[in-house]
Amino acid sequence: MHVPDGFLSPQITVPAWGVAAPLWAWAARRHLGRAPLEALPVMGSLTALAFVVQTLAFPVPGGTSAHVSGVTLLAILYHPLLAFACESLVLLVQALVLGAGGVTVLAVNALALGLAGPAAGWLAFLALRRRHERAAAFAAAWVATQVSSLAVAGVLGFQHALSERYFPVPFPVTLAATLVPSLLVTGPLEGAYTLFTLSLLRKARLHEVA
């Protein structure tokens, strides 16, 4: 669900950079600078795995693409700010190496895919985990996918309202094209990925959910 370069005007991308920059600094200070050494291999592996699964994207009508993100698990295991930092790195590498997304829209994509969605999933997990941890993990990933999709659709809809020259697709079309695959395909896939990977980590005793 990346937004490509050229779809958003500086009226949106510049403020997004202004919001994302201090959050990146906060995330680096809070998590990456003093992360325990034993946590680094798991964090690095999950970030690398997120990069791989996000390359498996398929285009959808409305100006974006659908794919599993793999970062909700980082939010569940560590914190949404860490998920934001790791997803931002994934998006930067994808933009520079694969041409996916873009540099001008990096902050927008990072805020939508790396912060809004994982933070919502983290909150859902905290609310549901006492009833059934596995169901809570699946629900958290599904919720995160929907929130990220809504954020992307909302940004594109706002751009259409600002200038149809930048993005000519009406918001109802973008919303339907973004949410339908998210609700029916990528949401369940994200949930399955989160459950499977979390189970592997627990079996290997590499991480316990805090």
Image: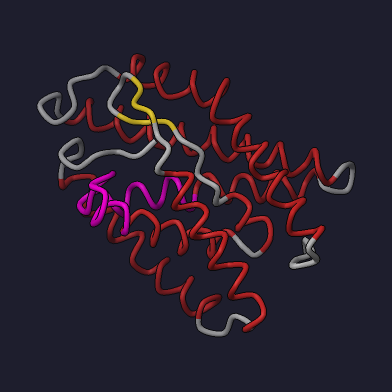
Q: By what rule are the colours in the image chosen?
A: secondary structure
Q: Against 91, is 86 above or below?
A: below
Looking at the image, residue 119 sits to the left or right of residue 8; the answer is right
Residue 113 colored in magenta in the image: yes
Number of marks drawn:
0
Looking at the image, residue 139 sits to the left or right of residue 190; the answer is right
Our reading of the magenta stretch's main secondary structure is helix
Seen at 74% across and 67% down, the residue is 206
Residue 187 colored in magenta in the image: no
**Front in this rendered view, residue 37 or 30:** 37
Which quarter of the image is occupied by the N terminus?
A: top left
Seen at 71% across and 36% down, the residue is 139
Which quarter of the image is occupied by the C terminus?
A: bottom right
User: Which of the 4 quarters of the picture holds residue 61?
Assistant: top left
Q: Position of residue 46 (x, y in %)?
A: 57, 59
Seen at 27% across and 17% down, the residue is 170
Magenta-highlighted residues = 93-115
**Front in this rendered view, residue 167 or 196:** 196
Q: Against 33, is 58 above or below?
A: above
Q: Against 200, is 134 above or below?
A: above
Q: Against 75, is 42 above or below?
A: below
Looking at the image, residue 165 sits to the left or right of residue 95; the answer is left
Q: Position of residue 188 (x, y in %)?
A: 63, 29
